[in-house]
Amino acid sequence: MLTACASQQEPVSPPVNLPETFSQSGELPTPKRWWTAFDDERLNTLIDQALERNLSLKATYQRLQQARAVVDREAAGLFPTVNASAGAERRETDTTDIDTFSAELSADYEVDLWGRVRAQVEAEEFRARASLADYQAASLSLAGEVSTTWFRILAQRAQQQLAQSQRQTNQDILTLIESRFASGLSDSADVLRQRQLVAASQERLVNVEAERRVLEHQLALLLGQPPAGSTPPEGATLPELPPLPDTGLPLALVQRRPDLEQAFRQLQAADAELAAAISNRFPRLTLSASTASQARSTDELFTDWLSTIAGNLILPLIDGGQRRAEVERQRSLREQRLYEYGQATLTAIQEVEDALVQEQQERQRIESLEQQIALSETTIQQLRLRYFNGSANYIDVLNALQEGQDLRRTLITAHQQLLGFRVALYRALAGSIETSPMEIGDKA
């Protein structure tokens, strides 16, 4: 009895050493609906639609409902079971027919002497809380996917506009070179090379268009809509990066993140299952009571009752070590959940640090790209001037032009990746969002 009670103590903290602070931190607190920090109303609308309509999220909510139903099913063991029965019988003899009517009311109840039934109920309650945390984590993940996909769509739209501009620039240069070739000032190879660049610009424009449409299909799927006919909001400008948020303390992160909450509840469920397995080795006391009546007619059926009450005590003596083995299995499972909780905690800390480092490096990369673009523009202008003056080779002009255009495309991608790293940081820092699963279930 004392062993069973002792096993129900509060689970210990994760078996890891948490750092006191993160490597970087801002000053502004992270809002619960963290995507609002980007100040993009189109993004806010898209995420609201996804949280309301996404089918995978609704499926996660139904798993939560199943877990809650299991709690109610197990909790029924804490109350008596009452059954009512009625019957009628006719026996035919050579001389007469005999009718017999009966009615019975019976009740059974297991006295939870060692807390076995209560421990099983608590285990399912913890699993239901784990399912709720899993639903909240899925909501956060969905918001992150919508944000990342939306920013990629904006980046592809910007790439499309840039590709159109670069194609026009390359076409204008081709017109000048063809004019010089007609005047005998340029070689035919220069014309062919420039025509090839124009064709490559057209191919790039087609590829960007195809990738943009694929991303729009992905966004429609996240919103619970069919890809065909789905039109995302207009716009081709990526939002500005918000200031770095306050990362807070690692210990607060452990208490806030829903995926860590889910791992912790699984640990508590394993602890309760261990208590139930230990209690199962002790005697069980079952009480039963019944009252019955039997008569020849329905008028006399309820005039005479026979009542009984009994108690049944079952003590397991020999089971070949089955119950002891189950206790050892549950104890090992509890240790497994403990280490999984610790690993999930370390992973959460890593995700924050990774996002911080990646964002810092991407900022430096963007600064370098902007400097390279400025130098590239100056180089292109000088080489073009020298080429048209006949003092430079066109290969140098072509290479500089291609490098400059590549740098501008890379800069757009870098801005999109920078926003993606910030989304990863917000997701790593965020707790549960203000989304009611009951509202989602009602709308389903």
Image (cartoon, rainbow, N blue to C red):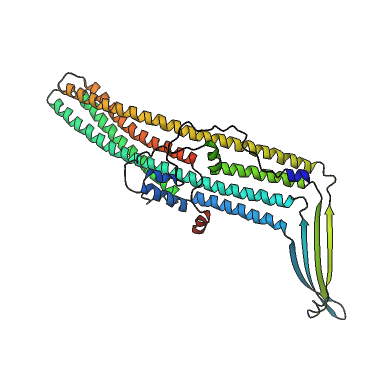
- The reply, left or right, for residue 324 in relation to residue 403 is right
Residue 16 percent location from the top left of the image: 60, 33
**In the figure, 113 relative to 200: above or below?**
below
**In the figure, 306 relative to 421: above or below?**
below
Residue for point 31% across, 45% down? 235
Residue 403 percent location from the top left of the image: 29, 26
Q: Tell me if I can see residue 246 in this picture.
A: yes
**In the figure, 136 relative to 408: above or below?**
below
Residue for point 32% across, 33% down? 409
- The reply, left or right, for residue 123 in relation to residue 382 is right
Residue 370 percent location from the top left of the image: 31, 29
Residue for point 16% across, 29% down? 176
**In the figure, 229 relative to 26: above or below?**
below
- The reply, left or right, for residue 201 in relation to residue 120 is left
Q: Residue furthest top?
A: 391
Question: Is residue 11 or residue 164 the one in the foreground?
Answer: 11
- The reply, left or right, for residue 397 in relation to residue 359 is left
Question: Is residue 230 or residue 32 the one in the foreground?
Answer: 32
Residue 244 percent location from the top left of the image: 41, 37
Residue for point 78% across, 52% down? 113
Question: Is residue 370 or residue 50 the one in the foreground?
Answer: 370
Q: Tell me if I can see residue 401 in this picture.
A: no
Q: Residue furthest right?
A: 95
* Displayed quadrant of residue 298: bottom right
